[in-house]
Image (cartoon, rainbow, N blue to C red):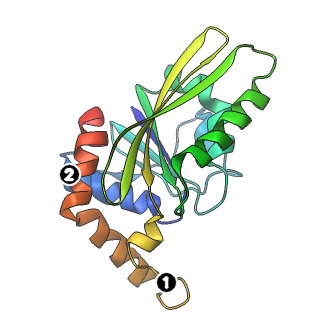
């Protein structure tokens, strides 16, 4: 199973639509499995997740918990999942800004497990997204985390105005963005081929 951790409130819906529009995978509500530590993290992640036999998409519902989950459960990811991805909102900042935040938090979290090393490489980009690869080492444990990053954020790219649009309108705009041909092409070459 592939795990994808999202940031924004509508990012989970967006990814569900991208996956359904780009592959044969079908998603449905995921109720969690007994002993699934990530599912039990209700303080961190709203139960707004979807599961197919291949993909689990977890969303933080606009709260700032993705980094906390990542740094606290990173060492379990390779044991539990075939692969894992992050979906970032950069909010117009450079990818290096977000990377530095992750690097600092990992170094603090694993301070006793020297060396702690994290590197970032931008693999590709288009007008809306970066495809990034994080590679790192914590003591003897080596890991790799692919990231797809909105250059701005989903709400801006989907033209969602939180004051003017109701939930149905926000959902519809999110689905429209997930059906955009250039969005699908980018995700097909940077995510879908990894999970399909």
Residue 187 appears left or right of 143:
left
Image quarter hosting the C terminus:
top left
Counting residues from the start of the chain, the first of labels 1 and 2 encountered is 1
Q: Please state the horizontal and vertical placement of residue 189, each as a whole percent of the image.
A: 23, 41
The residue that appears at 81% across and 17% down in the rendered structure is 112
| Mark 2, residue position | 185
* Element marked by disc 1: loop
Residue 152 appears left or right of 109:
left
Q: Please state the horizontal and vertical placement of residue 9, each as a whole percent of the image.
A: 53, 65
The residue that appears at 75% across and 15% down in the rendered structure is 113
Q: Is residue 34 above or below residue 140?
A: below
* Element marked by disc 2: helix
Classify 10 Å Cα crowding around label 1: few (below 14), some (14-19), many (20 and above).
few
Q: Please state the horizontal and vertical placement of residue 49, each as a whole percent of the image.
A: 48, 52
User: Which residue is outermost to the top?
Assistant: 140
Of residues 20 and 133, the one nearer the viewer is 133
| Mark 1, residue position | 161
Q: Please state the horizontal and vertical placement of residue 154, each as a whole percent of the image.
A: 44, 66
Determine the CA span between mark 1 and mark 2: 26 Å
Of residues 128 and 166, the one nearer the viewer is 128
Residue 105 appears left or right of 96:
right
Q: Is residue 155 above or below residue 138?
A: below
The residue that appears at 40% across and 25% down in the rendered structure is 82
Classify 10 Å Cα crowding around label 2: few (below 14), some (14-19), many (20 and above).
some
Q: Is residue 137 above or below residue 85?
A: above
Quadrant in the rendering for residue 124: top left
The residue that appears at 26% across and 58% down in the rendered structure is 183
Image quarter hosting the N terminus:
top left
């Amino acid at each position: 199973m592939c795990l994808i951790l999202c940031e924004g409130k509508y990012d989970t819906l967006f990814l569900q639509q991208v996956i359904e529009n780009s592959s044969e995978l079908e998603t449905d509500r995921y109720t969690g499995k007994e002993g699934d530590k990530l599912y039990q993290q209700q303080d961190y992640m709203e139960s707004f997740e979807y599961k197919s036999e291949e993909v689990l998409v977890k969303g933080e519902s606009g709260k700032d918990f993705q980094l906390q989950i990542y740094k606290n459960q990173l060492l379990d990811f390779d044991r539990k999942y075939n692969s894992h991805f992050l979906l970032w909102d950069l909010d117009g900042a450079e990818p290096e800004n977000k990377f530095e935040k992750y690097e600092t938090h990992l170094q603090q979290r694993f301070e006793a497990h020297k060396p702690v090393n994290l590197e970032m490489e931008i693999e590709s980009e288009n007008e809306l997204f970066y495809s990034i690869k994080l590679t790192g080492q914590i003591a003897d444990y080596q890991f790799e985390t692919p990231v797809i990053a909105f250059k701005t954020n989903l709400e801006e790219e989907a033209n969602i105005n939180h004051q003017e649009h109701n939930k149905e309108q926000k959902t519809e705009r999110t689905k429209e963005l997930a059906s955009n041909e250039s969005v699908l092409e980018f995700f097909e070459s940077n995510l879908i081929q990894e999970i399909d």
